[in-house]
C-alpha cells in the first residue's frame, strides 16, 4: 500500500514533460555550403540562412509541398522532415521537398549530385 501511494504521489508531483520548442535549428555543411536550417513548428515551414553572414537563402512551406513540420533530421544530402503527415525529405542544396518513398527509389539514387 505504501508503495502504491508513493508511486501515485510521484506521478502527481513529477514535473510535467516540457513542450518541444517551436523552432529547431540544424546546420548543414557540404559542397561549399554552410547553412543554418530553422524548422518552425508553429508555421510549418523551414527557413534556410547562410551560416557565415545570416543572409536568408529561402523558405519552404505548404506552397512548396511541405506539410506538417514537427522536427527535422539531417541525413547526408537529405533533410528529413517528420510530422503528422508522415516523413518527407528535402534534397539539399536544391531545397525541394518530396515524399520519403520517392527519395529511396532507384531513379532518385541515380540522379546527379
Image (cartoon, rainbow, N blue to C red):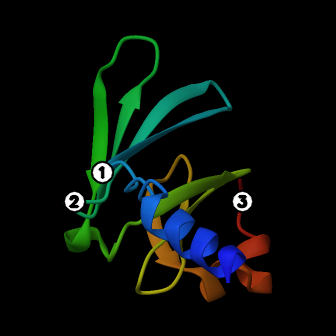
Picture disc at residue 112: 3
Does the residue at mark 3 contact the one at mark 2 (Cβ under 8 Å)? Answer: no
Q: Which residue, given by chain and number where applicable, does mark 1 sit on?
A: 22
Q: Residues within 10 Å of mark 3 (few under 14, many from 20)?
A: few
Tell me the CA gap for discs 3 and 1.
Answer: 35 Å
For residue 25, above or below residue 110: above
Residue 112 is situated, as x and y percent measured from the top left of the image, at: 71, 59
Q: Alpha-carbon distance for marks 2 and 1? A: 6 Å
Residue 22 vertical position relative to residue 34 in the rendered view, above or below? below
Please state which of residues 51 and 11 is positioned toward the viewer in this rendering.
11
Give the mark, 2 or 1, whose residue is nearer the N terminus.
1
Image coords of residue 53 (percent x, y): 37, 11
Residue 8 lies in quadrant: bottom right
Instruction: Label 2, secondary structure: give it.
Output: loop
Residue depicted at x 41% and y 53%: 18
Residue ID at (49%, 53%): 94
Q: CA distance from mark 3 to mark 2?
A: 34 Å
Amino acid at each position: 500500500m505504501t508503495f502504491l501511494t508513493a508511486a501515485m504521489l510521484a506521478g502527481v508531483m513529477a514535473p510535467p514533460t516540457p513542450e518541444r520548442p517551436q523552432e529547431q535549428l540544424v546546420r548543414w555543411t557540404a559542397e561549399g555550403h554552410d547553412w543554418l536550417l530553422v524548422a518552425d513548428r508553429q508555421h510549418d515551414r523551414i527557413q534556410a540562412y547562410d551560416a557565415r553572414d545570416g543572409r536568408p537563402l529561402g523558405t519552404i512551406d505548404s506552397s512548396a509541398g511541405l506539410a506538417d513540420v514537427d522536427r527535422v533530421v539531417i541525413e547526408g544530402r537529405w533533410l528529413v522532415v517528420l510530422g503528422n503527415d508522415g516523413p518527407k525529405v528535402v534534397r539539399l542544396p536544391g531545397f525541394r521537398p518530396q515524399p520519403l518513398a520517392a527519395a529511396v527509389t532507384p531513379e532518385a539514387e541515380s540522379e546527379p549530385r
